[in-house]
Amino acid sequence: MGAGRSRLYGNTKGAAGKISNAALKHANVGTFIRTPEGLRIKSGGHGQDNIEKLKKLGIEYNIVKTFPNGVRLGNIPTHRIRFKQKGTGQAWFPKEWTENDIRRAGEHVASLKGNQISKDGEEISGFWKGVRVGVIRRNGRIQTVYPCYDQSKKGER
């Protein structure tokens, strides 16, 4: 989550409450890197488009848990981040969510009154269509949007 060392999607332009196309692609499809073994996911990839790309590339993934709201938790054994290689380290939005749903969810959460002022890299969260959504900003701009691992309903936390 968030900007990589290259800051590729960290320096994208756009209003502070809007998500850039590059950051949206990171959140939805993910950022992939080439290794001697082939392509592997580096970060992001929380949409159904990520799962479709993993299938197309023949990259193994496992869905371990699905919440009643459709959020899925699982893992990608070849993920660059160890935490996401086993168990429930990777989270995906509900299968029916489109890229536009992810955009609207991130922009909605970022615009919530309690979330408008946040420190760089600090996770903010809120609900969109019954899903607890996390957002991280860097330099005042949305860097990534993802479903939170904790999908308890409002007031249950």
Image (tube, rainbow, N blue to C red):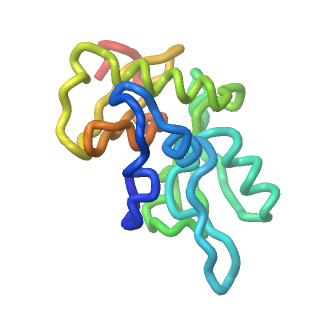
Question: Residue 155 placed where, x, y %?
Answer: 30, 13
Q: Is residue 99 above or below residue 90?
A: above
**Could you tell me which residue is drawn at 71 percent across and 26 percent down?**
96
The reply to whether residue 2 is in sight is: no
Task: Give left or right: position of 14 versus 79.
Answer: left
Q: Determine the residue positioned at 62% across, 68% down.
A: 40
- Where the C terminus falls, by quadrant? top left
Res. 143 image quadrant: top left
Residue 91 drawn at (x, y percent): 53, 43
Q: Nearer the viewer, residue 140 or 50?
A: 140
Residue 97, position as x, y percentages in the image: 66, 26
The extreme bottom residue here reads 36
Give the residue at x 52% y 55%. Answer: 87
Q: Is residue 117 above or below residue 143?
A: above
Question: Is 157 left or right of 83, judged from the image as shown?
Answer: left
Given the current orientation, which residue lies at the most extreme front position?
Answer: 13
Along the line of sight, which residue is nearer the eye, 59 or 3? 3
Q: How many marks?
A: 0
Question: Is residue 155 something that shows in the picture?
Answer: yes
Residue 38 percent coordinates (x, y): 70, 77
Quadrant for residue 82, please give it.
bottom left
Q: Residue at x 79, y 64 (%)?
A: 58
Q: Quadrant of residue 134?
A: top left
Q: Closer to the camera, 154 or 40? A: 40
Between residues 37 and 63, which one lies in front from this camera angle? 37
Q: Say left or right for 148 vs 137.
A: right
